[in-house]
Amino acid sequence: MNDEMLFSTFAKGAKAKVVRGTNCVIYTRVSGKEQTENLSLTSQRKACHSHAEKCGYSILATFGGTHESASTDERKEFQAMLSFVKKSKAKVSYILVASLERFSRNDNSIWLSGQLRKLGIEIVSVTQPIDTSGPSGQMQQKLLFLYGEFDNQLRKQKCTTGIREMLLAGDWPTRPPLGYDSINVNGKRKIIINAKGKLLKQAFVWKTEGASYDAIRDKLAEKGIALCRQRVGNILHNPFYCGMISHNMLEGTIIKGNHEPLISKELFLKVNGLLDQHTHGYTIQEENEHIPLKRFLLCETCGRALRGYIVHKKNIHYYKCCTIGCKNNRNASVLNQRFAELLEVFKLDSGEEELITLVKQQAIATFNQFTKGNEDARQLLHEQYKELKKKTDRLEERFIDEELNAELYNKFAAKYADELKEIEEKLTKASNKVSNLEECVDLAVNFALNLPKKWLSADYVTKQRLQFLLFPEGISYDRKTDRCRTDRINSVFLYFAHLKQVILNEKRGIPALQLNYTSLSHWVAGARLELTTFGL
């Protein structure tokens, strides 16, 4: 045995053996939906079949056959094709495409072709024959990929320039926001307000009257427009609705649009708290201690919130409805005093110790009675929540294992997230159990002991919070009859007023709010204690 044979046992590496199979898949695509109606897809498919037959390849599957943009790899058919070639039990050696731009036109194409080559899979363009077995051929293929991306960027630049010119001219280039429709009039595109838009207009008015996003969402849902809380905020902050256009391509500028505005610019600025920065010769003082009931008092005739103003010659403040023809105005001092007197109805007398003790005991007993039947509903919601969490975890596992593409994952992940949020909200509403119930009742009672005094001595913001705490939907005022009324009273304070009148054997009712002496007990009978509403 010679020396070479003796040392051969220490040799490293092995002679490379390139064994190419004959299995392939076909991928075809076009960029736009309108191209599916011509013969492009058919021509691509025929060219790939012809090449496979010529080379003796076995076609395992065909993918594509639809419109998918090559600017991203997050394509349904494209992802399905990649998943198939990676997991197929029958080894796939080639991906046949009519041209390399049909495979991909983005900067990820070179990396992806390299990853596939490591798996023994070559991308073959039947109209661009390149031998990719060596560095020279692989470089040619990379150059073609780069040219495809470059061409894509040039098209994008031209398209972007065109869209920006449209925006600068005041024309919205894409689908208009909720509340608008796009129609063709004499061959020209026109954006008009639809039926939903007329309903959305009311949302801006509600916001100026102090309604929260959740309250606006609930009111819109009653009218048939279901929106999430974030969507409500986006609508109220979108200047499109007041006739202005804001877009990333405008680089920080605002353009007057050619579409019909849904609301006035003044109303939009009021909603977003910017009107005081754009007044015309006058000053708006939002927090004025002389008119704490503004936006809280409502016009009985039109339902709009009353505003406050001052007559400088007399130095007298007034509340006024801004609707033309209503003439619903009243001296602010008179209505402020009347509201302070109204608070006396809900005040507990600190000298009546026995009364206060009875109120506390009865409040705790009533609360426990109302929350007694919630356990079954809460348990059912917990089970639904656990089941949905399992589905979410399973979805993530399938995505990690590449059983689902990104498009399907994002679709179902968003769906499950919305369902989880909905169940969480229901659990919050169903969970009325309060661990420190006695402390909550003590807090409510102590608050009621000093109710009028607290309101009179408070600043503007605290007064507003206190007003809406007691009367969540405000109080309507009619100047012609000089009467007030309300549709809702905080059930905690209403309950205290009712118990006080029962225990002291007084006639039950609130004349100042047009509630007769029998209606108060009816309201309390259907009310639930809302101890969690105390935030002052």
Image (cartoon, rainbow, N blue to C red):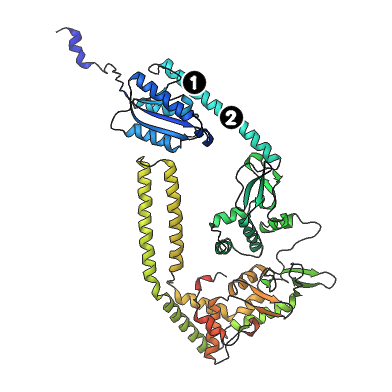
Residue 402: % across, % down: 36, 39
Q: Amino acid at mark 1?
A: Leu
Residue at image location 24% in from the left, 16% down from the top: 11
Q: Nearer the viewer, residue 450 or 30?
A: 30
Task: Spot the residue most to the top.
Answer: 2
- Say which of marks 1 and 2 sits in front: 2
Residue at image location 46% in from the left, 35% down from the top: 66
Would residue 513 appear left or right of 109 to someone viewing this image? right
Residue 290: % across, % down: 73, 72
Quick one: quadrant of the N terminus? top left
Q: Which residue is mark 2?
A: 155
Would residue 142 appear left or right of 506 to someone viewing this image? left
Q: Which residue is mark 1?
A: 143
Disc 2 crowd rating (10 Å Cα; few below 14, some 14-19, many 20+) is: few
Give above or below for 151 relative to 373. Answer: above
Disc 1 crowd rating (10 Å Cα; few below 14, some 14-19, many 20+) is: few
Give above or below for 218 relative to 241. Answer: below
Task: Spot the residue most to the bottom.
Answer: 505
Would residue 185 appear left or right of 527 to someone viewing this image? right
Give above or below for 201 relative to 514. Answer: above
Residue 227: % across, % down: 54, 57
Quick one: quadrant of the C terminus? bottom right
Q: Nearer the viewer, residue 258 or 412?
A: 258
| SS assignment at label 2 | helix
Of pointers 1 and 2, the one earlier in the residue sequence = 1
- In which quarter of the view is residue 397 placed? top left
